[in-house]
Amino acid sequence: MRQKHIHIALALVAVLFVPLLTGAQDVTESALKAAFIYNVAKFTNWPEETPSSKVFTMCVLGDAAVGEALERTVKGRLLLGKEIRVTRLNSKGSVRECRLLYLSGVTKEQIAQVVASVRGTPVLTIGDLAGFKELGGIVGFFFEDGQLRFTIGLESARKCGLLISAKLMTLAREK
Amino acid sequence: MIKLHISLRVRWNTVRLKMGAMALAGILVPASSAWAQAPLPELSLEDLMKIDAGHVFGASERIQSVTEAPAAVSFVTAEEIRRYGYRTLADILRSMRGIYVTDDRNFSLLGAQGFAKPGDYNSRILLLINGHRVNDNVFGQAEIGAEFGLDPAMFERVEFIRGPASSLYGDSAFFGVVNVITRSSSALGGGSVTVEAGSLGTTLLRTSFGRTFRNGLDLVVSGTRENSDGERRLFFPAFAAPNTNNGIAEDLDAEGTKQFYSRLSFKGLTLTSAYGTRRRDVPTASFGTLFNEHLWREQTTDRHSLVDGEYGRSIGQTNLTFRVSFDRFTYDGTYPFEGEQVGIPLVGKNSVIGTRWTLAAGFTRSLPARQTVRAGLEFIDNIRQDQIVRYVDFPELGATTARSSTQHAIYFEDELKLGRNFIVNGGLRYDGYGDFMKVTPRTALIFMPSSTQSFKYLYGRAFRAPNSYELNDLYFGDSVDHLRPEVIDTHQFVWERYTQDWIRTSVSSYWYKANGLITSVADPAALLGTTFVNQGEVRAKGLEFEAQMRLKWGWQALTSYAVQKATDQDIQAELSNSPRHIVKARLSIPGPLPKSFISMEGQYLSQRKTLSGSHVAANTVANLNLIQPLGHSWELFAGVRNVFDSEYLDPASSSHRQDAIPQNGRTFRFGLQLKLWPK
């Protein structure tokens, strides 16, 4: 009987420690947000760039963990046939290269300022602050019953010249 | 020769174990990536929207990541409740690592960290509904069986926060906190009618309705009625004598529940009301009542009513919450004792009425330098804490103990993020009662080398105040007036890790010392022959492992192992009803048809000591559940509990003549749900 217990215990311990032998990635909140950012981008249409660049730049302001996770997420993937580059901005960084901009963990004032600075240019702004849409942001993340949901500011997207696919619209929620 | 033989045997066993473990690891390592589900970015948005972000509310009274919470947390979601066919809060909690439930065929006792003293009224676990305390104010009891009063189909999530949390919640948050989060209409989607039928004459009818109106008003209403005849014949060897029907209790295991729930939210205001009643026949002839008595059967009825209003508002970086709640708990028990004339029992009626108002206010504020503070005030007015005893036909023998009390508390918690990798967390709460006060601290140091991993050291102190029942000097003599709260100090180490997009592992260890435990002892001078004293110290240590996996083809699995050793320091002996090993595994797989799921689980408990000093054998229980949507509007489900019909017992309390109580064998259940206005 005792031996049986030890067997069970050892088997479980073995199962538990297997993941440690392999590399680390995760389903933490940051990884989930990163996967959403990438997927939302897939369902967005940007106007043609002139002059066209070879890379698609995603910028992250504020949340370093999401920045890290996004780098892992987009590694080896393409968007609009282009290689994806993730740039982590500090509060004074230039948003000129960004075609997608994720803002989190910064103040409401900073968000309003950054969103205003990209108004009218084709930059998909994504954030997780309550009222992100009202600040002029396009995709607002929020949690409902522990699962990630998003709102879409269609009017802001239109002003930026971005086309949000119908599929994304059907999955969007109102907070 | 014998010696040599043994040493060879041992060595062979060691070799075999090592080989076994290596083989297992060997199989799993190369297979791991093949078994893992597709990487997150390759999942569809719909699938991503189903992934749980691993948030917890109850650890700090605000939503935060499990990895950042100052506790070792487990939770079960509504989807898991549906897939595994959980029918009570006890079923849900039983699926979590290290937790076990002891059923005496009347009440369910929750065991955590190796502690579940038979006869206790679950007063060392704090039970919350949406953050509001629902342990009653007479027994301090967390009712987790059908007597809980709320239908698990209305649960959005159940969180279990291990370890002491008195620094946030005060009384009863001793071994852990159970927080039940109820459903809103957006999660419920339209309405439904459900009928179920099963073994032991079980029937259930549930109707629910949920709607979000255009102005933002969110409304949910549901009602459930369930009845069960229970086991027709239950055999108790302790009563195996001709004058007690040879130990067979016939038709004395019935249970009936009615549950009502509604939730209305509009802007920042949420109004939850619930009423639940459970009537149960007690087949065990507990408290020295007559065995197999039908004229006046031993029976208990528990009723819970709750009206809870909560208002939340954000002003800048500050979130304010206000709460006003009213709780009412009543309990009626019928106890047939042997009368002076044969065939005419002396019938005792025991009633309890507990009502209280709770007023609470708190705020959470993010400060610069990545600091978050939470502070709050709580005031509880226990309007009634009445205990009534009377005897049918002898009104002059009755006695009523009317009691009322107030308590107040203030608490503060501060979380400071240091650099990118450290979180320091400290909290303190003051609780004032009429006769005593208590200050309880909690502290946590969390190190996160990356966003996928966290190491936590947690220390906390918690208390459980003597409850009104224990303070009843009519029953237990004047000495109980001097009872003081019991105290626990717990240290925990937790290591949580997310790996490869598909597996979450958690290893936690704990060590605790519980002091001045309120213990029942014999006292010939007291009316009931027993009294309570602050006596006894329990020390325990334990280790828990858990792995949660999201595999290919939508498979979801959870496996856990807990080992613990709890010792009664007075007698230097193993605690009763404390299993050394608990092993659990569960798996939910899609199929065989589109949108259907087969879910199975197995739970193993090693042997447990009973009050008489003998042991109930180790047991393994397996459950199986199938759900099958039929078109858009219908869903069928079928469940088998205790698939292998294993016979097992739970240790009994001192109010039983039995040393252990037999549990149900294999039972079946079928159900059909009609969804109204599905999305």
Image (spheres, rainbow, N blue to C red):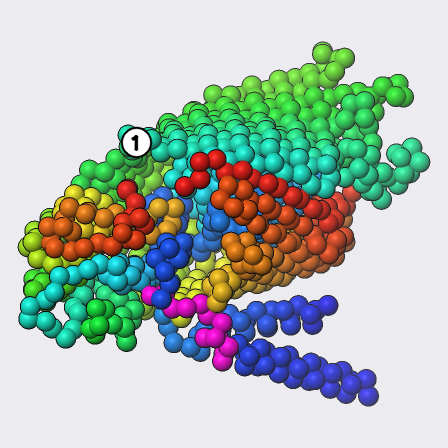
Q: Considering depth in this image, is B457 or A58 the residue closer to the camera?
A: A58
Q: Which image quarter is the C terminus of chain B in?
A: top left
Figure quadrant of residue A85: bottom left
Residue segment shown in magenta: B29-41
Q: Residue furthest right?
A: B242
Position in image of residue B222 (x %, y %)? 50, 31
Residue at mark 1 = B214
Within the magenta stretch, is there residue B37? yes
Q: Which image quarter is the N terminus of chain B in?
A: bottom right
Amino acid on which the number 1 mark rests in the picture: Arg
Query: Does residue B442 appear in this view?
Result: no
- Residue B538 vertical position relative to residue B154 in the rendered view, above or below: below
Query: In the rendered view, does B2 fall on the left or right side of A169?
Result: right
Q: Considering depth in this image, is B18 or A162 the residue closer to the camera?
A: A162
For mark 1, name the chain: B
Position in image of residue B374 (x %, y %)? 29, 43
Residue that appears at 37% across and 58% down: B48
